[in-house]
Image (cartoon, grey):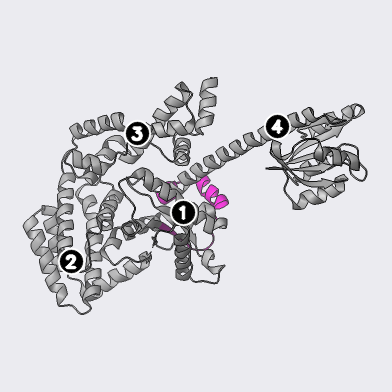
Amino acid sequence: MLKVMLVDDEPYILQGLQVIIDWEGEGFEIAAVCSNGKEALRYLTENHVDLVISDIRMPEMTGLELLETVKKDKVTDAEFVLLTGYDDFAYTQKAIRYGCCDYILKPVEEEELISVLRKVSNRNQESIVLRKDREKMEDAYLARVIRHLVKGKFTGEEVDYINKHVQISGSLRFIYIELINREAGVDEEDPDDMSVIQRQLFNACREILKEYANNFTMDISYDEENYNIGFIYCETMAEMRDMNETEFLNAFIRKIELLIMKPVRMLCGQLVQNISDLALSYVTCRRLKSITGFHNTKKLYFYEETEENQGAVRGFVLCKNTIDEIIDSIVKNDPALIESGVEKLYEELRGKEGNNRAFDLNINYLLFQLIHLASELDDTVNQEEIIQYISDRASEGVFLRGSHQHLKKFALEYASYLAELRKSISHGILAEVEAEIRENFAENISLKDLGDKYHINSSYLGQIFRKKYGMSFKNYLTNYRIKEAARQIITTDEKINRIAENVGYKDSDYFIRKFIEIMGCTPSKYRKTNRGA
């Protein structure tokens, strides 16, 4: 219901206005009745209304003076309709210059009042649509700027934009907030379901930290199957609540879980002092993600803890020679040497004091070496892809504490993966993938499914796809879908949400955000602009 205020110094006119029509039936609620402009102004400074219907001639403050004061001081953005007589027409012209929506001649006729109310209602709906479009544009642009920052490819203008629109003070961290999927019962093979859950997680985070809503983003990574939330944390968030960092983040996790009824965890990148150094925090967050699957599940991980562990490895229980042998056997893709090396490592670890800690420290060291191994073999390899590969395998739960069989399985698969990276690009496979996208772009296509279909490692397929097209498979598919949606928007009269479904999006909000990101405007504006050309 839109709220309306009636202002007139004649009581019988106010009474008549209240009963002349069915206000609720027209979608309006009478929020206040005032007898002069000063009384109305006091109400407007403390309360919200959508429409003010005011007489022009009143004692103390006229309707015209009320309108002028409200617009000049930006007291309210309510629409104004003035009640006027025939001899007040000069005043009416002035009122329109001040931003008056319309005027009604006295005595007020039912049909004329209803006509004006419907005009105001339509303007309000148009305003809501425009505001939502603007908010979606701003969200898409902010997500793009944050992504540039964490990739270390940003301009001075983008840093200025972040400083204006994101609450940043003190030291910073980039944090991943993600579902603990194997406990949440989520089908990771259905991207549409995952995107809906991601939206729920995103909304929950913004609802809990309303004043820091812009510190969250959904579009932070180019990973093929990434449904995490990116979070720019700053020290003052905890300080203003008289908490330390760990207390604040644990409390935040509990609140999120209460809202979405699913378990989550946070992966906290390295603490940095400046927004321009956020890329370092992001990279360390990604590295942290790649090793979490090797340990018992926790709710909160800090990169600094892994750094401390690395120091402990180097100075305490590092089985360096054996780990070097395992890495060398992975490079050679020698299954027998890999299996014997893993057996040897576990045999050595059984003789160490604090066996579980020794296992953790040595596995962490091994992973950090493997992360860099692929880029040493091929400098065109995207290291983040390697981090994601390791992270995916860790997230599948194949690593259980103390199980050498799981480590063997990973090492053998990783050796095969590296061997594939050394091969030349298979243009035949890529042609098949292109055909799949053209024919089935509206379906749930994933690299994993394509890898299984064409008998090729999905991570390797992702690498060669990026080499040829300069973008990830996920981004290529998204671009194809959005371009097809743009074609349908221009050539058909179907509703936007229906077109979103046609090209593979169940979540229309997600579709609109992606459309803005790629096409530079909302779907409705794109239709209006291109059909009018």
Which residue is depicted at the point 37% across and 58% down?
285
Q: Which residue is mark 2?
A: 403
Q: Pointer 3 and pointer 2: residues touching (CB < 8 Å)?
A: no
Examine the image and state in which quarter residue 9 appears: top right
Looking at numbered disc 1 in the image, what kind of residue is underneath it? Ser
Above or below: residue 262 compared with residue 528: below
Q: CA distance from mark 3 to mark 1?
A: 38 Å
Q: Which is nearer the N-term, disc 2 or disc 4?
A: 4
Q: Which residue is mark 4?
A: 118
Which residue is depicted at the point 79% across and 47% down?
32
Q: Which is nearer the N-term, disc 3 or disc 4?
A: 4
Q: Pointer 2 and pointer 4: residues touching (CB < 8 Å)?
A: no
Q: Which residue is mark 1?
A: 276
Q: Which residue is mark 3?
A: 442
Examine the image and state in which quarter residue 17 appears: top right
Segment colored magenta: 148-176
Front residue of this view, candidates 257 and 459:
257
- The answer, for residue 498, to whether it is visible in the render is yes
Whether 82 is among the magenta residues is: no
Pointer 3: residues within 10 angstroms few (<14), some, or many (20+)?
some
**Secondary structure beneath label 1:** helix
